[in-house]
Image: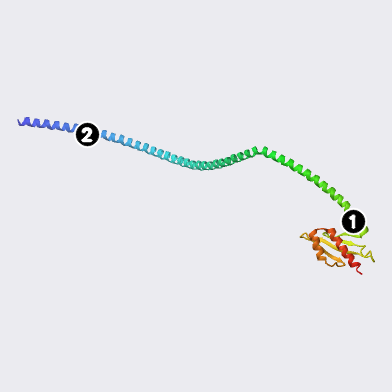
């Protein structure tokens, strides 16, 4: 029985050793596979990390490019907004100018509609003015004829005055008239009697330089300015000269 037990115990030990060997072999195989798997995994991880790094760099490059393009687009947008604002202002100005031009055209159109009527009135007014001018011209011609006749009469009368009454008129400077008289003094018909007359800035007669002096001169000048009858004044002065010259 002891031998049998030893045999059995030896067989169990041998079986256990064999099992341990098989387990160790399996363990080594599994460990090798795990190590191989770990190497493959590490290689895969390294490859993935490299790919991920490349993708990250590419992603960053794309982001940088995108940001640069975005910056350019924003700058373009700001430029376009500014141009749009300027264009809007230009359009508003042109709109205002167009409205003003349209208003002016409307006003001119209204004026143009009134032109024929105004032209008709102006034509009539011009015709009336021409007729009035012709009438005034005729009146002027008549006045000129009358003046010419009076001048002729005056010249004839002046000749009579100069030859019979010894009356002469001489212009002194620009605004003064000297009246010279002779045939006054009976004892000396050639004696000269004279005075000077002019019209001042207030349209009043002024007399001066009497030779000889005439009494009551102020009253005679006042009457001349009142009546404006110069011929009567000359006759009155001649009468005064006659009194003075022939008093003795």
Element marked by disc 2: helix
The vertical placement of 63 against 247, above or below, is: above
Residue 199 is at least partly visible in this image:
no
Q: Quadrant of residue 70?
A: top left
Residue 243, position as x, y percentages in the image:
89, 66
The residue indicated by pointer 2 is 27
Q: Nearer the viewer, residue 107 or 173?
A: 173
Label 1 sits on residue: 158
* Residues under numbered marks 1 and 2 in contact, where contact means CB atoms less than 8 Å apart: no
Quick check: 173 left or right of 6?
A: right
Q: Quadrant of the N terminus?
A: top left
State the CA–CA distance, disc 1 to disc 2.
Answer: 174 Å
Q: Residue at x 88, y 65 (%)?
A: 241
Secondary structure under badge 1? helix
Q: Position of residue 94 (x, y in %)?
A: 57, 41
| Residue at the outermost bottom position | 248
Vertically, is 188 above or below 79?
below
Query: Could you tell me residue 177's position as x and y percent?
Result: 85, 60
Residue placed farthest to the left in the image? 1
Task: Measuring from the top left, give residue 85's x and y in whole percent.
Answer: 51, 42
Taking the image as shown, residue 199 lies to the left or right of residue 192, namely left
Q: Is residue 79 left or right of residue 18?
A: right
Tell me what residue is drawn at x 12 percent, y 31 percent.
12
Quarter of the image for residue 207 reads bottom right
| Front residue (pair 171, 48) | 171
Q: Residue at x 39, y 37 (%)?
A: 55
Lower sequence index among marks 1 and 2? 2
Instruction: Tell me the quadrant of the picture where the C terminus can be found.
Output: bottom right
- Disc nearest the viewer among 1 and 2: 1
Q: Residues within 10 Å of mark 1 (few under 14, many from 20)?
A: some
């Amino acid at each position: 029985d002891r031998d049998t037990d030893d045999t059995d115990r030896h067989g169990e030990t041998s079986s256990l050793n064999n099992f341990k060997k098989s387990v160790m072999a399996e363990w080594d195989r599994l460990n090798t596979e795990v190590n191989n798997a770990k190497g493959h995994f590490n290689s895969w991880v390294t490859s993935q990390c490299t790919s991920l790094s490349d993708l990250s760099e590419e992603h960053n490059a794309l982001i940088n490019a995108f940001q640069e393009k975005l910056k350019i687009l924003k700058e373009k947008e700001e430029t376009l907004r500014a141009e749009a604002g300027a264009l809007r202002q230009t359009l508003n100005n042109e709109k205002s100018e167009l409205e003003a031009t349209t208003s002016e055209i409307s006003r001119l159109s209204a004026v143009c509609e009134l032109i024929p009527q105004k032209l008709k009135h102006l034509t009539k007014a011009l015709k009336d003015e021409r007729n009035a001018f012709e009438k005034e011209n005729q009146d002027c011609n008549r006045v000129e004829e009358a003046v010419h006749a009076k001048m002729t009469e005056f010249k004839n009368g002046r000749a009579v005055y100069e030859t019979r009454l010894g009356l002469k008129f001489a212009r002194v400077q620009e605004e003064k008239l000297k009246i010279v008289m002779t045939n006054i003094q009976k004892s000396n018909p050639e004696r000269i009697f004279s005075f000077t007359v002019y019209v001042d800035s207030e349209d009043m007669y002024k007399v001066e330089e009497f030779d000889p002096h005439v009494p009551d001169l102020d009253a005679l000048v006042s009457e001349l300015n009142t009546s404006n009858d110069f011929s009567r004044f000359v006759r009155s002065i001649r009468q005064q000269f006659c009194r003075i010259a022939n008093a003795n």
